[in-house]
Image (spheres, grey):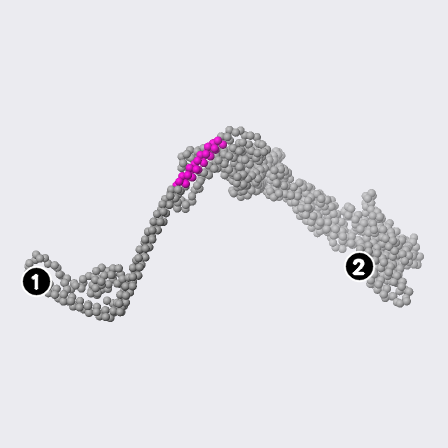
Amino acid sequence: MSSEPYLDHQVYLHPAFSPHQLSASILAGESYHPSDPTPSTSALAPAVGSDFRPTSRRGSNVSGLERERESKVDISLTLARLNFGIDEVTRQLKAEITTHHTSLLSLSSTTTHLSTSLTQVRHGLTQVSLSLERLRLKIRVPHQTLQTSVTRLSHLQKAQDVLRRTHRFILVARRLELQIGEMISTADEEEKAEGEGRKERAMNKAAISIAEMESLLAYPLKPSAEEQETASTEERPIPLTAINQVTRYLPVLQISKETLVSEMENQVFKGLSKLNQPILASALQTAFNLGLLPSLVSSLLGDLTEAVESRIKKTFDPSQLAKEAGLKEVAPSDTSGYKYRSSGNASGKNEPTPQNAQLWANALWARMSNLIEDMVECCIKVYILEKVLKVKKDPASGVAFLDEAMKVLDNKPSYTFWTTLARTLETQSKEAARSSGFIQQTLSAGYPRLLRLFHQFFAKISVLTDTVYTQNQQSPETVLLLRSLSTFENQYLTRSTGRVNEVVSNAFAGGIRSPPGANEGLAIARVITNELDSAKFDPLLLRSVARNVGVALGGFRSRMDNLLITDNAAYTMTGTSETSAQVLNAQLTSALYHCHSAVGKIEGEYNERVMNLLRPSILELEKLYKKHTADLLGAIRREFSNTLGRLHRVDYADGAKEADGSMMSMGGASSPYMKDLQERMSFVRTRILAPYNVGPLKKEWTVELVRYIIQTFVLHASIVSPLGESGKLRLTSDMTELEFSLGTFLLAASGNDRRNALKIQDIGEAYLCLRAFRPFLFLETCLLSDPARTVHLPALVVSHHILVRSPLSLPHQQHGWSEGEYVRWVEAHTEPEAWALVQKGVAQAVNNKNQPGDDEGSGLADVEQAIDAVLREARAQLGL
């Protein structure tokens, strides 16, 4: 036994515990386990002996007796040893009991307590077993009964469903036979405005019946792979095809569907060919009922686009053109596209000769006309189809047919048609242009005629479609289609641009020795207007031509700008003859003017989008020649101003004498400055302005120069100081001579147009000012500020004359300027600024000379008041 003070009591609680086996284990010196078999009697083996064998009673020999005696001795010894062992065990047990009696007593108490607990647990387990049995009787048995009933009910429902669907299938099949018979026996009725005929209604009913029968055959839907694996054989749906009564009607269903589909397709073709929307809508309704609407629409659209593609390929096929033109039959071209032909091959069978070129051209244009007709037919059919699809809805479900068709279509039918048409036209036109020089030459040279054919196409389809192609509005579809003809358009535009560039180059062919003039400018404008007029009928072509024309005009303007001379030689007025630079600039300006004038007349003929392409170049031409003429007129004005400035070299005071010492009189010779002015005017008229062939623009220049001369003369005359009575008479004589010279100047500028000849009265306010200045010189000083006496005279001129008659200095005298410098300052500033300068100078002069009790000071105040009144009236008229 273990030497531990406490023993494991679990050994004694084991259900297989045996005290005898425990004792035997202790005697044998082995550990005891309740599950071990009975210990061996190895302790008794030495006592008994290994060679002990029981002897038979029959043995009576001596050796048997000896063995018996020996065995008795051994038994006695063994028993003695056994007794000794028992005593020893007893002693050890007592010692162990004495040593571990406390533990044994504790184990005994624990065992007793556990026995009570185990009894209670055993009782509880017994109750649980009884409860489980009662639950089994209450749940499992009814559940098994219910499951059996549910399975039986499911089978009954399946059978009922199969019977219901079978009954419905047979009923619909019999009805279908009647509907198909009615559809076949009913003659086609003429379409009525209010709806469909009997045949169409019968077709729709038959389609509904076929769709219902197919849905009954397809129900229940085919299960998925996972459902087939998980579902048992009994749970799988029963197809109607397993019913003999149903299978007998399947051939009837197939034949009826084929008949109905065939009749439906005939109705679709009939509706499209006759553009009959009710018939087409009825046929599409039949297709929708059959579930074939998406595939039918896709097939129809494919057939229409394929027909157009085929017709386009045949139209642009040179071999087909050769056959139609009456030539020998040639090998058909490859359907995948036209292969490149060398120039030698192109001049063979598939190219015309000079003798039959016109025949070929007529055949090509006839084929293009037929192509347009085919395109119109297909386009209208596509739009009719799309319109019916868009409007038509299923009466039962409310589903729009277009939405149903879009399940298999990428885009709307009209979009697909236009993109296919444009793509095919672009591809085939490029191939035809590359393979046939004749087609390329004919269609590019006659591109306007080709465009007119497409205009006919747009006009014909616009009745039934929403396509618009006008000067102000173009539908995206039309633009897309015309862009597909870019091959021929680009070649036409190249020729058009070449014609414009050619006439521009010819204008500069003579170089600086023979620069372009008015005739060249008109020639350029004429070619440009012709090109624009040729493309006027088509807005897209017109914009392309206008864009190229704008570029050509820009190049023409740049070359003209390079030729124009802007140095002093172009604006000098010295000498008696014009310079070569002035003659050159006159030629170039005339060319620019006539080109601008002729091209500018198209302003109201084209829409704003076209003019936006042309207007910048046209304005650049005008800006260029006006810049040059402005500089030239500025030089002429400076020359006239300098000449009129010599007026102040003449002494206009009382008692002034002529150069020979005689008294100056009104009837004396002309003033020197006036003679110089007349010579300068004659020089400008005959030498400077004469080379300019600018039409009415020259009259405008002349009027402007005359107006400037009068204004400058009056301004200079208003500051003449001192001015006496005889000086006034001399100045009046100069004004008379000036008026006569200006009249001659104007008349010469009119040329041969005597009916519309310019007169000095046409100058307007400037001439009235000159006429009013003559009597103004002889007015009393007190009347100078009277507005009624100075109606047409500027306020500055009146103020100047008041100062001339007063002791005050004139503005230029106060600032130390010369008369010419002061006149140039007045021309460079506005009237209010000049008035302010005069008024300020007068105020300062009056303040400087005004002394108390001085009579002269009171007279200066009157001058200041008169000038203030004149300037106040002038400001009031301007609203200042």
Q: Position of residue 695 (x, y in %)?
A: 77, 46
- For this rendering, which residue is in front, 792 or 730? 792
Q: Position of residue 361 (x, y in %)?
A: 61, 35
Q: Position of residue 363 (x, y in %)?
A: 60, 34
Q: Which residues are magenta?
A: 155-179
> Which sits earlier in the primary sequence, circle 2 or circle 1?
1
Res. 381 in view: yes
- For this rendering, which residue is in front, 59 or 438? 59
For the N terminus, give its image quadrant. bottom left
Res. 501 in view: no
Image quadrant in which you'd find residue 366: top right
Compared across the picture, whether 363 is left or right of 789 comes to left
Where 7 sits versus 733, above or below? below
For the C terminus, give its image quadrant. bottom right
- Disc 1: CA contacts within 10 A as few (<14), some (14-19) or many (>=20): few
Residue indicated by mark 1: 66
Label 1 sits on what residue type?
A: Glu
User: Element type at marker 1?
Assistant: helix
Q: Residue at x 21, y 60 (%)?
A: 38
- For this rendering, which residue is in front, 135 or 863? 135
Magenta stretch: dominant secondary structure: helix
Label 2 sits on what residue type?
A: Glu
Q: Is residue 169 magenta?
A: yes
- Disc 2: CA contacts within 10 A as few (<14), some (14-19) or many (>=20): few
Q: Of tags 2 and 1, which is closer to the observer? A: 1
Residue indicated by mark 2: 833
Q: Residue at x 28, y 65 (%)?
A: 110
- For this rendering, which residue is in front, 322 or 619? 619
